[in-house]
Amino acid sequence: MSLGEVRGSDVEDLDVARAPQVLARLRADRPDVVIHLAALKGNAPSRQRPVAFFRVNAQGTLNLLEACRRLGISRVVFMSSVTVVGPGETPADESSPIRPLHPYAASKAAAEALVHAYARSYGIRAVILRPNFIVGAIPPPHPYRDNLIYDFVAKVDRRGALELIGDPGFQREWLHPSDISRAVQLAVEADLPDCETFMLSANRCTMWELAELIVRRVGCGRVTVDPAGAGFTLISSSAKAHRLLGWQPRVTLEDIVAEIWEEYRSRCAACPPPHGEVHD
């Protein structure tokens, strides 16, 4: 099914933290549905810049919702994060309590609360999506940021070893961008009433299993463990998304690692380091 005309905007021509810009852009386009993806992301960066994260992620969401209210745009899809519920040894679902672990997660939780408030107060029909880690190959010249699989691939290739910090049995889940985009499409097509939240999860594995998979794909290297470090399990259940949206992830973790490895190799071939230099 075609979604019709899809128009995008990015940080070069729209700052969601500036309400007049948001209102002017939506007034010019008059979309039927707004898909809100604009955000600052990352655990460590949010600890360093909490005010900036709330300005973009929470205030930016408020600006967008207020523009929708003023212009009569009645449908919003908001990309949140599984981190709003925090770590846990059992899979979180949509009823799990909100327990953000860092400012990034807290800013997303605040944005979710705004989405719910505007849905209840002004009749905006909204879908909130909470994916786990989204990873895939990034075409140059764009840099990789906050992509753990790419970092692991680079370390194995350049150093011949990959050190895991903390318990290697901690679990994570990994989703490919194409599976996320399909979830967004299904959310638009479903045209659900009120405000619904959906966890999105796939490819659950331990950190040790992920490291071994990367070593096998690269074809060399070893995995070591520093047990002194901290870590935690962050997993969820996407049963509701399967049931109400018909969403099922299609891209396997093996496919994700292979895609990133091939892109990494192409970058290395295009820009080899000076003789004898090893990048960290």
Image (spheres, rainbow, N blue to C red):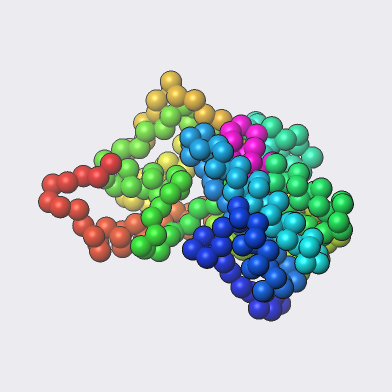
Say if residue 246 shows up in the picture. Answer: no
Residue 77's spot in the image, x, y percent?
A: 71, 59
Per the rendered image, the range of residues in magenta is 100-109
**Residue 140 picture location, percent across and down:** 36, 63
Residue at 64% from the left image edge and 52% from the top image edge: 60
Q: Nearer the viewer, residue 224 or 180?
A: 180
Residue 203 located left or right of residue 2: left
x and y percentages locating residue 196 in the rendered image: 80, 53
Instruction: Report x, y in % for residue 190.
Output: 79, 66
Q: Is residue 34 visible?
A: yes
Q: Is residue 105 magenta?
A: yes
Q: Which residue shows up at 31% across the image and 38% down it?
A: 161
Please, what is the dominant secondary structure of the magenta stretch?
A: helix
Looking at the image, residue 111 lies above or below residue 226: below
Q: Is residue 47 left or right of residue 32?
A: left
Q: Nearer the viewer, residue 77 or 22?
A: 22
